[in-house]
Image (cartoon, rainbow, N blue to C red):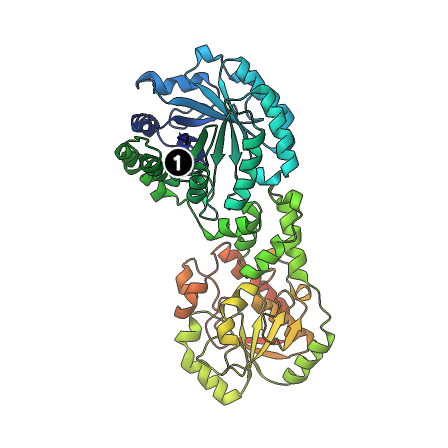
Amino acid sequence: MISPLLLDCTLRDGGFVNDWNFGIGSIKSIISRLDYAGVDIIEIGFIDERRAYDENRSIFPDTESIKKIFESIQKPSAIIVGMIDYGTCSINKVSNKDDSCLDGIRVIFKKEDQEEAIDFLKQIKDKGYKIFANPVSITSYTNDEVSILIEKLNKIKPYAVSIVDTYGLMHSKELLNYFDIFNSKLDKNIILGYHAHNNFQMAYANSITLMNKSLERRLAIDSSLFGMGKSAGNVCTELLAMYMNEFFERNFNIHQIQEAIDVDILKEHDKKYWGYNFEYYIAALNDCHPSYVQYLLKEKTLSVKSVNEILKKIENDKKLSYEEKLIEKLYNEYQDNYCDDIITIKSIKDEMLNKKILLLGPGRSIQDNADIIDEFIKKNNPITVSINFLIELFNIDYIFMSNAKRYSQFFHLIHDDNSKAKLICTSNITEAGMKIEYIVNYSTLLSDNKVIKDNPLIMFLKLLKNININEVWLAGFDGYTQDNNSNYYDDYTRFLYCQDNVFLRNDAIKKEILYLSEYMNIKSITPTKYL
């Protein structure tokens, strides 16, 4: 069994975390420590002509500027490589190998750019460099497409070709499928690489799976210190070095790797977290770009079930290339989910018309003024409706839910066996095995003001306007302050929204209530910024 090569890409892939701003001291320290540790290949950053030279960043406008790193440190014995994202660096920014401190250049390229990228790789090879071909998002290729790509690469004979799992989508079965194709068809003299991401926590396990294959060729496994890297991060250099020492008779100096982590990497981790997280897990689960997930979760209106349902609507050929207009369209279509609610509206009207209505919100005043609210309920016997939440301080007649995320969070209370409250939901919320008594159309209750487009209080007041309710009391609708924790009663703080546009929301809600006041008398029995 041939020992794999260890390729550390901290200064390149790790740079996605900190905009490559490691500092010149840490850049030199990382290179030196990795070299002393015996790492075989060190990738020292991107070559990108769009970026101006900055000695503190491991991203360079040309190969010439990389020389400055080695002015005060010894040229490593490791193979030193840089990376070009095809299309971001023209060939005239790459000097001849004899005038460069780089031994090789890796080029990443998308499937649709493979012809031009392979020609670009050939031009780099003609300048004397070892060339590394990195086709990104290998999971977007069919088996036949991989075979065709390999035929093209064999013609230019790169030093190495990598299986690149850009979004961490592969388990061992999928990985071994691609491995078998590359191993059988790629020229035996070409090193086969693997670049993993940790969306499924599979980067280390998959790397071990490949290393344990009996090979006629050499493997090169990408890694980074402490897993530092884009999205969910990479496989850890320190773990692979440990494993190779134990099972492949390598002699990596683990102490040097640990020192690099302690001195140069942990401070970056303190500034910005990387590694496995919920967003990247959902993205990998749906084989899609993480930005689609981030867009949907940022809306703060969707349950995870709803997020998954929307992601499944993305066409396969668009899943890995983010299009904001597409996900915005799918989100709006999902939320609209039109239903014919004429009969439902009539039923609600029959139950509420000519009754006093008290709407309860999650503001801190609902707890601070509980006695006042309780006294009002005893004296007036109103129909009580809790809006997008549920509190156990008072007897609730109806629960109004317009937000799938809130519905999911309060699900156990809403459907508790002891709850006698009837449920009114907007049509963007789907039943989850439990009965929803009333479903009203979501889109017809939206506000024209984007800042409060789907504000639940305004939506329910519009519903009351439509059924000719004349008088409404509010409690717990305090309005927003800059201090998020002071906006809500204590037990609600774990469900908080983000605090974007808080003052704009106050003003917008106030204006909307002023308009609705032309149709009904709206009063508040607790302090509020809206009246």
Q: Position of residue 110 (x, y in %)?
A: 60, 33
Looking at the image, which residue is at 46% across and 18% down?
63
Give the camera-side residue of 470 and 183.
Answer: 183
Residue 76 location in percent, x, y?
Answer: 34, 20
Q: Amino acid at mark 1?
A: Ser
Which element is circle 1 on? Answer: loop
Q: Quadrant of the N terminus?
A: top left
Q: Nearer the viewer, residue 476 or 37?
A: 37
Residue at image location 61% in from the left, 34% down from the top: 146
Left or right: 238 as drawn, with respect to 152? left
Residue 136, horizontal then vertical, whole percent: 56, 35
Q: Is residue 422 shown above or below 337?
A: below
Is residue 489 something that shows in the picture? no
Residue 63 seen from this side: yes
Image quadrant assignment for residue 455? bottom right
Q: Residue at x 45, y 84 (%)?
A: 374
Q: Residue at x 41, y 82 (%)?
A: 371
User: As displayed, is residue 347 above or below residue 28?
Assistant: below
Q: Which residue is tagged 1? A: 224
Q: Is residue 277 above or below residue 336?
A: above
- Horizontal placement of 496 versus 187: left or right? left
Seen from the viewer's position, the closer of residues 148 and 324 is 148
